[in-house]
Amino acid sequence: MGAFVHLSLLVCACLALPRAMAQRPAFSEQVLEGVVRGAQNQSYIQAPFHVPAGTHRVTITFAYTAREQHTALDLGLLDPTGLRCWSGGNKSMLTVGLSDATPSCLPGAIPPGTWNVLIGVPNIRKGVESHYTLHVFLSKTGEVAQQPAVLREPLRAGPGWYRGDLHMHTAHSDGECPSQTGTMVPCPLFFTVDAAARRGLDFIAITDHNATSQYDAMRELQPYFDKVLLIPGREITTFDGHVNFLGTTDFVDFRLGTSAVPDLNTLLGNADALGALTSINHPDAPSGEICMGCGWTPRHPVDMRLLTAVEAVNGGSEKYGLSGIPFWDKQLNDGCRLTGVGGSDNHRAMQPLDEIGSIGSPTTVVQAAELSTPAILDGIRKGHVFIDLAGTHDRMMDVTASAHNAQAHAGDALKAERGVSVHFTLRVTAAEGGTVRWIEDGKEMPSAGDAAVNSADQQFAMQWSSDGNRHWIRAEVTDGKGKLWLVDNPVYINWEIANRCGPQ
Ligand SMILES: [Zn+2]
Ligand SMILES: [Zn+2]
């Protein structure tokens, strides 16, 4: 108390992503400034601010002057009911959300009303003035892309191909590992992230079944694991199928069949409204008592436009020979432009990393503008993705299709009128001993011929003549005996991307 508090309200012009986020103002920012004087030594100061109803997250950053004169100010946060955070002097940023909070803070409901930043003054010398600046960000959504910059800073700047895994389970659902005495127990989330780090992955999405409790553990681990981006995810697990929701921490009601969620279209529409990227998992898995609701078996017709991706390769299905590729191909043939991704579906973080289904097996490789959650999800939305089934560190494939003066890469659309010849090139790296094949509308193109990969960095060419109709063409690399090593996303010829899942 007693400090001069100046409050100014800034309305942020938050970042714009291609999704229809512009209608939704994402967060507000306030700046609280004040002065602490020598007479306030060994006291507590409160800086109040108002939190409106409907706020999903409160984030504060804190800076102050006169440190060189041994001024020390501690940081805490009070909600209208009591102490929410106390960090002492070791943190300059605190965030409190519905599911997760900075260590030092408690996650949970965000009660509306007057909150206070709590500033402890363990030391300020007589005659010294310390000026502090607090930024208070109030988020109206749990979507990562819509958070203030301090919460979505990239782990690595700059464009690149980033390697990761989009599907795994921890103690927060049915992930398990041996305890100290060898009993199988719910496996602490740390071991999952540690396995991803040991594998050298750039990102993982932790997708426990329907839960949101894993985000708090991720909040604690991310500063330590500063080379592995932790993407908030969930495997929405219903009686009609399993769908990954990526990129938001907001709760989604998964209780399919209740009046709140009568069908999958309602569920997927709710996810879309929250900014989640949705991806069907293991669509060809069997449903029944062995795996309840695992296959994609909707009781009502699903509007496939509500989905962005499909798990073409699942670690478990690879093991049991149940590929998601036929399902994916059928969607593409129906005009549904779904990005093909991979996911280990790992449930045992401690399993050896050379086993099928270990974390990173398969690896999903995404071309993204930077290593951040919004950029990785944007790369998946654009289809700039290939799947490395063996989860290597270095295998690459990159398709370029050219017609007239236009170029397209995997995931892109290209216009080619009847009679136009499209020139495809494929660059394959670190896949010696493999064989290249081309798939057109779900069928291998015999005319393209098999081509042996016999050097570490090799280019392949393929000429294709357009009939003017809608087609999709993708490249694959096998081990030469048919076992898949690399699966690319298609180049879309004559597709109206805006009209996905529609007639030509
Ligand atoms: Zn599943
Ligand atoms: Zn799963």
Image (tube, helix red, strand yellow):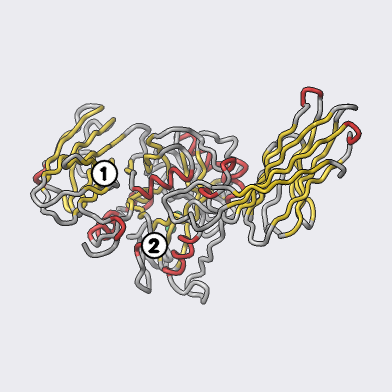
Label 1: state its secondary structure: strand
| Relative image position of residue 264 (x, y in whole percent) | 42, 68
Q: Quadrant of the C terminus?
A: bottom left
Compared to residue 302, the image places residue 444 above or below, namely above
Amino acid carrying label 2: it is Leu
Label 2: state its secondary structure: helix
| Relative image position of residue 66 (x, y in whole percent) | 78, 27
| Relative image position of residue 114 (x, y in whole percent) | 76, 55
Compared to residue 157, the image places residue 184 above or below, namely below
Image side of residue 147 versus residue 203, left or right? right
Dot 1 or dot 2: first in sequence order is 2
Q: Which one is in front, 266 or 183?
A: 266
The residue at the far top in this view is 68
Residue found at x 47% / y 62%: 237
| Relative image position of residue 412 (x, y in whole percent) | 28, 46
Circle 1/circle 2 CB separation < 8 Å: no
Q: Quadrant of residue 93?
A: top right
Q: Residues within 10 Å of mark 2 (few under 14, many from 20)?
A: some
Q: Residues within 10 Å of mark 1 (few under 14, many from 20)?
A: some
Amino acid carrying label 1: it is Leu
- Which residue carries the number 1 mark? 484
Q: Quadrant of residue 482?
A: top left
Asked whether the viewer can see residue 322, the reply is: no
- Which residue carries the number 2 mark? 306
Asked whether the viewer can see residue 171, the reply is: yes
Mark in front: 1 vs 2 = 2
The circle on residue 374 is none
